[in-house]
Image (spheres, rainbow, N blue to C red):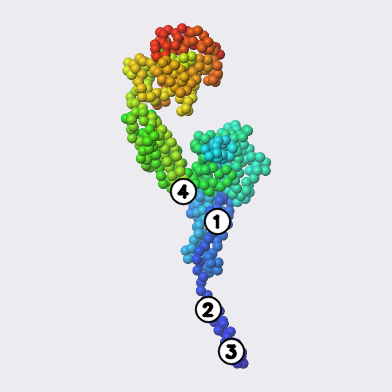
Amino acid sequence: MKVQKILSMAFAATMLFACKPPEPVEVAGITLNHATLQLAIGETEQLTVTFSPNDASNKTLTWLCLEASIATVENGLITGVSEGTTTIYVSTLNGKSAECVVTVGKTIVINEAYSNGGRFTDDGTSYGDLDWVELFNNSNSEKDVSGFMLYDKEDKSEFVILPENTKIAAHGFLFVEVDVAGGFGLSSGGDKVYLENAAGEVIDQIEFGALAIDEASARKPDGSATWVVQTPTPGTSNNSVVAKPIISNFTQTPASPTDAESVFVGASIVAGDGELTTTQLVWKVNNVEKTPITLVFDNTINTPNFYDGTIPAQEVGAVVEYTIVAENSAGGRAEKSGSYTVIVAGIDYSVLVINEIDGNGKFVEIYNKSNSAVNLYGVYLVKNEKTANEDIWWTGGDVSIAAHGYYSIQQSGQDPALGTEQTGLNGISPKQNVKFELKAPNTSVIDEFVRTNGGAWSAKVKPEYDSTTPQYSFARCPDGTGDFGLAVPSCNAANPATADGPIVTDD
Ligand SMILES: [Ca+2]
Ligand SMILES: [Ca+2]
């Protein structure tokens, strides 16, 4: 009996102890199984929460999505609604929380485009051999893209069709070279790309601007609606590289400033990744570095994100080179360069003509029809429609051509006593197609001479005036105002009042 009583008391004590309410275990923190998530429209994905500590007493959660138009969430089950990026928040009753950034996109999208295929950077990098696009599968299941079609013109005159059995893994990438036989090239100055599914429906279309050799236009994050410019990542995620700032709508006014004019330089600049930290104009005059000019945001210009600054007026002949530099807080950097040469104000260049061209004596003679001298600074001759700087045949220095005077430019290697100056370039021939354009510093054409049979500039043309006697030049007769005809060469001297005959092209 006594033993039984003792046991009974022990049992009661135990019961008393067991019934004492346990101390609640507070939630110290929660984490989600995804910090970021990619989802196709209409698709679902379950987020799961891990509690710390795991035996926390109250695991009640509240879920919230910032933009229900992009995605919805119910007990951690996310449903993609429309293209965009939003954030899912989950919190406990004691205020611990976690979040997941959700990007919702179309199931299969054009994720990246590269337009400088076949070229190499200075360090030999090639981002794929040919122009290419990258497709991305936003969804969490593998997708068959056999028969999908890519093209860059609405008439579908050139296209690439993805072959049978082409699949893209869940959240995977497909690298597609497009500048292949029957395919299409992408313009490095900017282009469009369309993507059709096997049923012939356009499921994505993009448009991108000018890209440098080390730049691609890319969705970032992958599959999102946000486009950036960054180092190409063919066939792999765009998320791992830093997006550069994008400089567009570049403006320089005036194009050919005089010594009385300051120069307005501006561009639209967006950050890419992070925030803009630098918008600067780095510049030099005649190779001497100047203090950089800060480009400031200008809301008076009706162009978005426009930053501009002003380079002060410089002396005649000054060569001004400048670079817009934009940097973002993520370490991305972009540049856009320009240059100009300061010209003399108020010159009427229309009084200048190409007066004579001699393919035998190898000179071009310029004549001034007016009663006053004309400064030739920045006036230039272009041969055979070439426009690259190295192909400008001659550019005038700070010299003047007298009233009713002549100024001749010889091909290199000719008798220096004959002309006024020599150009380093050669190539005047009396038996080839030829065109010379005399241009003002603002690039407008003042006068031109052309003799062509319609073929290539390198093509031979008959008759070959170097094999005739005399070896004629092509000259305005009389000086300045007459039509071009055949004349005995007269470098830096008056052309005859009438030509010996017309310039003939047999073929
Ligand atoms: Ca990529
Ligand atoms: Ca002459």
Query: What residue does disc 4 label?
Result: 330
Across and down, in percent, residue 109 comes to 57, 44
Query: What residue does disc 2 label?
Result: 20
Instruction: Name the quarter where the N terminus is drawn.
Output: bottom right
Q: CA distance from mark 1 to mark 2?
A: 39 Å
Q: Is residue 452 left or right of residue 365?
A: right
Look at 55% across and 61% down and name the residue there. 49
Q: First in sequence, mark 2 or 4: give its number.
A: 2
Q: First in sequence, mark 3 or 2: give its number.
A: 3
Q: Amino acid at mark 2?
A: Lys
Q: CA distance from mark 3 to mark 4?
A: 75 Å
Q: Nearer the viewer, residue 458 or 446?
A: 458
Q: CA distance from mark 4 to mark 1?
A: 23 Å
Query: What residue does disc 1 label?
Result: 34
Residue farthest right in this picture: 164
- Are the residues at dot 3 and dot 4 in contact (C-beta closer than 8 Å)? no
User: Does the residue tagged 3 have its C-beta within 8 Å of any atom of ligand 1?
Assistant: no
Q: Amino acid at mark 3?
A: Ile
Q: First in sequence, mark 3 or 4: give its number.
A: 3
Disc 1 element: loop
Q: CA distance from mark 3 to mark 2?
A: 22 Å
Disc 2 element: loop
Query: What residue does disc 3 label?
Result: 6
Q: Nearer the viewer, mark 4 or mark 1?
A: 4
